[in-house]
Image (cartoon, rainbow, N blue to C red):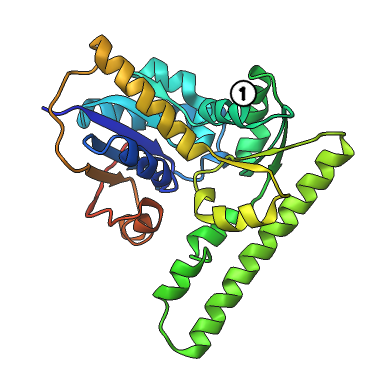
Amino acid sequence: MNSTIGVFDSGFGGLTVLRALAARLPRARFAFLGDTARLPYGSKSRRTIARYAAQSAQFLVREQGAEFLVIACNTASALALDAIQDAVPVPVLGVIEPGAEAARGASRTGDVLVIATDATVQSHAYAAACHAQGLRALEMACPLLVPLVEEGWTGPEDIAAQDASAPLQVAAQAQVEVTAEVIRIYLAELNAEAASLGMNADTLVLGCTHYPLLRPWIEKAVPAGMRVIDSAQAAAEAAARLFGKHESEGHLPNAQFPVTPALRCFATDSVEKFERLGSRFLGWPTGKVDLVDLGG
């Protein structure tokens, strides 16, 4: 039996992590679980998030045979990584520490900025991870960005998908302009606050798995020369290194992988929405998404 990498998120934004993983491990098998029945995790207590995340991790390991887990959820990585590691007997990697490590490699000044959801910012997990890397970090919540992504206001590919009629083309262009302006306002506020604190920030970390779909507009909005770090890409790179390390040490079987990536997707609710939006995050069709019940 081929080895399987389990990928978990509270929704389907973590498919950007899976997409990056598949690019680095094209012969691996993947099982992705979105706990869509119980999102958003950010409104829950740490204890509840830990319980939900542990149940999801156990499903991937016990039911799908995952021998390595990537927690493609910033909230779960920030608040439940220890609980997940205690719940399953396989290597587990979150998205926050790899993002901070990538920022350390990119920054010359040691000052970095982080944009994320409210829950991730309130946890200060990125600030702590950056501090551990010798960096000074300023975090900012950008609550409008996730709904803009999920509504499809993310760029030319969505405009091209619209009906060719002029009114719809104009409306789609207006949507993109709104998204670009929201990003510009957020980043202008963040850079102004950084300057007021005497920071010389040269690196921006995207601390949410939805944000890679906004990267072209984010890169246009940052000051010239500022590096943009995609935590999804950073986590995938770290997972690929760790996967190979554990495989060579015998923690994962030395399996024969299929030629192309194999994927099964699971969700705890809203499978139709998952199938509809998931391909935008993943870059190819998710295929049939299976509904699972993890309990309360």
Hey, which residue is sitting farthest bottom in the picture? 166
- Residue 170 lies in quadrant: bottom right
Relative to 271, does residue 34 appear above or below in the rendering?
Answer: above
Q: Residue 140 location in percent, x, y?
A: 71, 42
Percent position of residue 9, x then y: 42, 39
Look at the image and tell me in which quarter the N terminus lies: top left
Residue 147 visible in the picture: yes
| Type of the residue with mark 1 | Ala
Q: Is residue 136 above or below residue 290?
A: above
Q: Which residue is mark 1?
A: 129
Q: Image point 23% across, 25% down: which residue? A: 62
Horizontal side of 249 relative to 188 (left or right) equals left
Of residue 257 and residue 49, the one placed in the foreground of this image is 257
Residue at image position (23%, 30%) is 4
Quarter-of-image position of residue 112: top right
Residue located at (18% from left, 18% from top):
253
Image position, residue 158 (x, y; %):
45, 69
Which is nearer the eye, 219 or 88?
Answer: 219
Q: Is residue 287 left or right of residue 216?
A: left
User: Does residue 295 appear in this view?
Assistant: no
Image quarter in which the C terminus is found: top left
Q: Residues within 10 Å of mark 1 (few under 14, many from 20)?
A: many
| Residue 64 relative to residue 234: left or right | left
Location of residue 214 in the rendering, given as x and y in whole percent from the top left corner:
55, 55
